[in-house]
Structures are given as structure tokens and as C-alpha cells.
Amino acid sequence: MFWRFLLLGCTSFGGPAAHLGYFRTTFVVRLKWLSDDHYAHLLALSQFLPGPGSSQVGFSIGQHRAGLPGGIAAFIGFTLPSFIIMTAVAMTSLTATAAWVPGVMTGLKWLAVVVVLDAVTGMFSRFCADKATQAIALLTLATLVLWPGVGGQLLVLVLAALWGSRRRADTPGLVPDGTQGRVHWRWLVLFLLLAVLGVPGLLGGIWPGFYQAGALVFGGGHVVLPLLQATVGDAISQDAFLLGYATAQALPGPLFTLAAYLGALLQPEAPLLGAVMATLAIFLPGFLLLLAVRDYWQSLLARPRVNCAVSGINAAVVGLLMAALYQPVFLQGVQLPWHLAPVVIGVLLLRSQRVPLVLLVLGFALSGALLSNVTLAA
């Protein structure tokens, strides 16, 4: 589990929407560890819980496959590469300035378009099979293009759930084996205790702000930035904060590892320990809530009305991914007309399922560097 997610942590460029595409390609299409329906249920739950959505889905996949140790191994593997780089940047104040770096980033943005497009088309064909669910997805797309942000996301998810619950259902949904159908209160109590009491000693001063950010942010990714800016306040300069944010965007893996960079800067006398504490604090609340309610969520799916509500949520989630495909993935990745050519080639290669993901990453990085240099020379 650790090695599979470590590979993804080294190659999953493009942000949360692209991560969900990588996960689906790897664990649903190729490895068949879980079905499309089960994956959609995990994805829907992650949209309703605070915290890093793509990391919560990865944690759930690891837990489904190998229990709690599998979830922990998945989290460590997926987070470790970007954690190491972000901590090193904070400790050395270095940033990549080589001439080839912008070209590589351009190629990886093309790959993000390919991966998210593949995820959107696959999920659209699976979860938007009739005109009603197709309408939900397209209305969600239109709403989030006009009203981006957490408020719009929560509104469309709630409305889609209400619409779905009113549809007629004759059969219950399928529930994964091993579901106990109850809330695990010990995880919920631990979530509340850590929020109220924090962690005495061990750089406990870092804990409250980062834990609060992880517990309150819906939508993950870029949405956490205002909370982190408020957390660090004047302790870190605006230029240093923006350097960390830009570096996190350029790396594979979760954007929440920006916390590692900030934690190291806040504790210059013990930067590694500060990075570890800040990272655990920002990721842990979302994982604890997931452990508390996941089984209960899965058991609810056995009820016909709830299963129909989830069908509406699934359609809305497809719309969320479509909106993410448009902005920021497509608009940042395809900035010139000829950029569509490598995207089309990438879609064909990914759909063939004959090219390993790591080779696609290397190929797009190399192509971006070479084509960008050719364009500049011309």
C-alpha cells in the first residue's frame, strides 16, 4: 500500500481534481480494488466532510484494502514526497530557478488536463446515464463557473441530494462487505478533544491554528489558503508565504503540505519537528471525521431513498469535476491552440491502458521542456 501511494505521491501533478482522476485510473480501472460505485460513494462523502478531499479518498482506499494500517500507509506514501520537498525549501530557502522548470510544469499541466478529462468522461457515462442526472451535472457546472467557492459547492450538493431523495427507488443500494453501520464515537471524541485541548508540549503552540484550518475548510486545496494566512499572521512574511504556495502548486501530491513549509518556518530552532506537527495537525481532523462516520455513511446507502439521494450527489460531483476541469485545470494547462495536440495524444495513450502512469508523467514532463524551448527559440 505504501509503495503504490508513494508512486502516486511522486507523479500526481495537477491538484485535487487530478488526484481523483489518478486514483480512479489506478485503483478502479487498472487494479480493480473497488468498483466505480464504491469509489463514487467515497468521493461523495469526502465532498461533505471538511479536510483535504483527495487525501481523504486515498486514505479511504487504503483503509478499504488493508484496514487502518492501510489507510495510514496510503496517507504517508502519498504525502511524503511533497512533505520532504516543502520542508527542504523552508530549511534552505531554495526554489527551482532553472530554465527548463517552466517547460516541465507546462507539460505536467497538460497531463493534468488528460487525467481529469478521463475521470470526468468515465464518471459522466457511469453516473449520468439519464437526462435528469445529466441535467444535474450540467447545472452544477454552470453554477460553479458563475459562483466558484465553497458556498456554491455545498449548495449544489445539498440540492442534488434533495432532488435525488424524491426519485422513486425500488431496490436498495449495494453496501461494501464489512460495513458495521454505526458511528465510531471514539474517533469523534478524539476529534473534539484534540480541537479543545490540543497537544501539550511538543510544539503544541503550532497545533491549534493548523488543526482548526483542517477542521473548518471545505473544498480543500486553494480554499485552505485564507485560513493558513490567518494562522501564521505576521510571523511569516507575505513573500515567504507566496513562495511556499507557489512551490506547493508545482509539486505532486496534496497542496495541504504547505503546512509543512509553514511549520518549519515557524519553528526555525526545530524545523523538522515543526513541519511534522503542522502537517499532522492539518490532515488529522479530516481523517478522524472520516473514520467516525464512514461506516454509517456506507450503511445509509442500503436505504432506497438515501441511495437515490446519493445518485443525485454523484451527478453533482461529476459537475464539480467538470468545473475543476475548466478552471483551473484546462485554463492553466491549455494556454495556446497547439497545446491541444499533446492533450489529445495523452488521452489516447491513457485510454489504451498500455502505457504506465509513470511513463506518461516522464513523457509529458520531457515533452513540455522540449516544446517550450522550441517555441522560445522560434
Image (tube, rainbow, N blue to C red):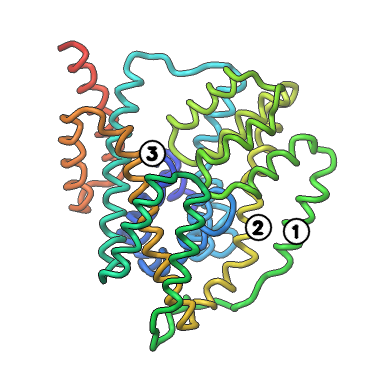
Q: Label 1, label 3: how many angstroms apart (C-alpha)?
A: 33 Å
Please identify the quarter of the rendering in which residue 125 is found: bottom left
Tell me which numbered mark, 2 or 1, is placed earlier along the sequence.
1
The residues bearing labels 3 and 2 have C-alpha atoms spaced at a distance of 26 Å
| Residue 27 higher or lower than 273, as above or below | below
Residue 23, how many percent across, how many down? 39, 53
- Label count reads 3
Q: Helix or strand or loop: what does disc 2 sit on?
A: helix
Res 14 label: 3
Residue type marked 1: Leu
Residue visible at 49% across and 81% down in the picture: 302
Q: Amino acid at mark 3?
A: Gly
* Mark number, residue 288: 2
Q: Find out whether the residues at labels 3 and 2 contact each other: C-beta distance under 8 Å.
A: no
Q: Residue furthest top?
A: 377
Of residues 343 and 129, the one nearer the viewer is 129
> Residue 278's x, y, as percent?
67, 37
Residue holding disc 1: 190
Crowding around mark 2 (Cα neighbors within 10 Å: few <14, some 14 to 19, many 20+) is: many
Residue 164 visible in the picture: yes
